[in-house]
């Protein structure tokens, strides 16, 4: 059995100090779902909104632009620093799911953009989001489904072609905490947390990225695939990069940019 505390600690180590690398690469991918996420909870003027796992503050800034009164939290110091720059109107604090330091029913809406993927206790995380939402308020979250998208497929193929191996010590979710990354599975996670009127819809889009920009996030160790790549020995890393450069041509459009098809799930529910 995997220790879920170790999972969370490993996730914190993965993201430590990587806010700028995330901003310059994968944050642009994650930003796509922000408008739909805020639509689900009705973010608008005067709505008291909590953005959980705000990262560099993309969703928080978008909610502020809609006139919401925004509080945001993240576990990582470097993310908080960038989030405060990107969303200066938001109240941004440090906190870790599921330990949200807020009174019950304190918010009209709570959102989490690609955060439930990164916690050791997903069910407890959604329950914590529901706890701080007032009766009648809305909770919404996005997760990657399987397969997530072509960008990670490209990086995985490069790792395989180079004969690289997954390094030891990467987080693995306790099977007892796992849930199906399907519409039904994610919706059930929301329902089990005590939310009603639960919906879950797929979202697909084409993400455009410069090949070196996309490689830069992985080479800097952002996310699990980034850890797999960045922790290789120098010779293996050179082989992975060479394989990446070769394979990237399959994903490039006429302008040279990668056209990466991605898939996610967006779930929402009402607190009672």
Image (cartoon, grey):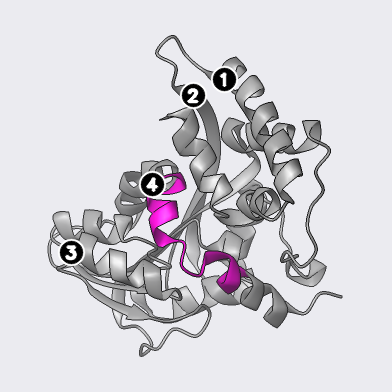
In this rendered view, identify the residue nearer to me: 233 or 205. Answer: 233
Q: Are marks 2 and 1 in contact (CB under 8 Å)?
A: yes
Give the residue number, with chain letter if any, for mark 4.
24
Give the residue number, with chain letter if any, for mark 3.
68
Going from the N terminus, do you reach mark 1 or mark 3 first? Answer: 3
- The N terminus lies in quadrant: bottom right
Going from the N terminus, do you reach mark 4 or mark 1 first? Answer: 4
Q: Are marks 2 and 3 in contact (CB under 8 Å)?
A: no
Going from the N terminus, do you reach mark 2 or mark 1 first? Answer: 1
Residue found at the very far front of the displayed protein? 235
Q: Residue shown at 62%/38% (left/top)?
A: 152
In the rendered image, residue 197 lying in the magenta stretch gets the answer: no
Residue at mark 1 to residue at mark 3: CA–CA distance: 38 Å
Residue 14, quarter of the rendered image: bottom right
Residue at mark 2 to residue at mark 1: CA–CA distance: 5 Å
Q: Does residue 244 appear in the picture of this structure?
A: yes
Q: Secondary structure at mark 3?
A: loop
**In the rendered view, does 108 fall on the left or right side of 212?**
left
Q: Nearer the viewer, mark 1 or mark 3?
A: 1
Residue at mark 2 to residue at mark 3: CA–CA distance: 35 Å
Give the residue number, with chain letter if any, for mark 2.
258
Residue at mark 4 to residue at mark 3: CA–CA distance: 26 Å
Give the x, y percent position of residue 81. Answer: 30, 70
Q: Are marks 2 and 4 in contact (CB under 8 Å)?
A: no
Q: Residue shown at 80%/63% (left/top)?
A: 168
Going from the N terminus, do you reach mark 2 or mark 4 first? Answer: 4
Q: Is residue 198 above or below residue 150?
A: below
Magenta range is 11-27
């Amino acid at each position: 059995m995997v220790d879920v505390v170790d999972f969370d600690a490993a996730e914190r180590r993965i993201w430590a100090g990587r806010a700028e690398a995330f901003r310059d690469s994968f944050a642009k991918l994650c930003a796509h779902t922000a408008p739909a996420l805020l639509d689900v909870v009705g973010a608008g003027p005067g709505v008291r909104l909590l953005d959980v796992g705000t990262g560099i503050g993309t969703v928080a800034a978008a909610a502020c632009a809609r006139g919401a009164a925004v509080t945001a939290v993240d576990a990582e110091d470097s993310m908080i620093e960038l989030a405060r720059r990107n969303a200066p109107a938001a109240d941004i604090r440090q906190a870790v799911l599921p330990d949200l330091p807020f009174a019950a029913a304190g918010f009209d809406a709570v959102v989490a953009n690609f955060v439930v993927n990164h916690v050791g206790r997903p069910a407890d995380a959604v329950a914590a989001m529901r706890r701080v939402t007032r009766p009648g308020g809305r909770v919404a979250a996005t997760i990657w489904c399987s397969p997530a998208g072509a960008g990670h497929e490209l990086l995985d193929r490069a790792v395989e072609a180079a004969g690289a191996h997954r390094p030891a010590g990467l987080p693995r979710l306790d099977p007892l905490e796992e849930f199906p990354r399907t519409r039904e599975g994610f919706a059930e996670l929301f329902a089990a947390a005590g939310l009603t009127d639960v919906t879950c819809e797929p979202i697909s889009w084409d993400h455009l990225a410069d090949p070196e920009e996309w490689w830069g996030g992985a080479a800097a160790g952002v996310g699990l695939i980034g850890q797999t790549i960045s922790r290789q020995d120098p010779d293996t890393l050179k082989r992975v990069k060479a394989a990446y450069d070769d394979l990237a041509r399959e994903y490039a459009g006429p302008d040279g940019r990668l056209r990466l098809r991605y898939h996610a799930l967006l779930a929402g529910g009402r607190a009672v």
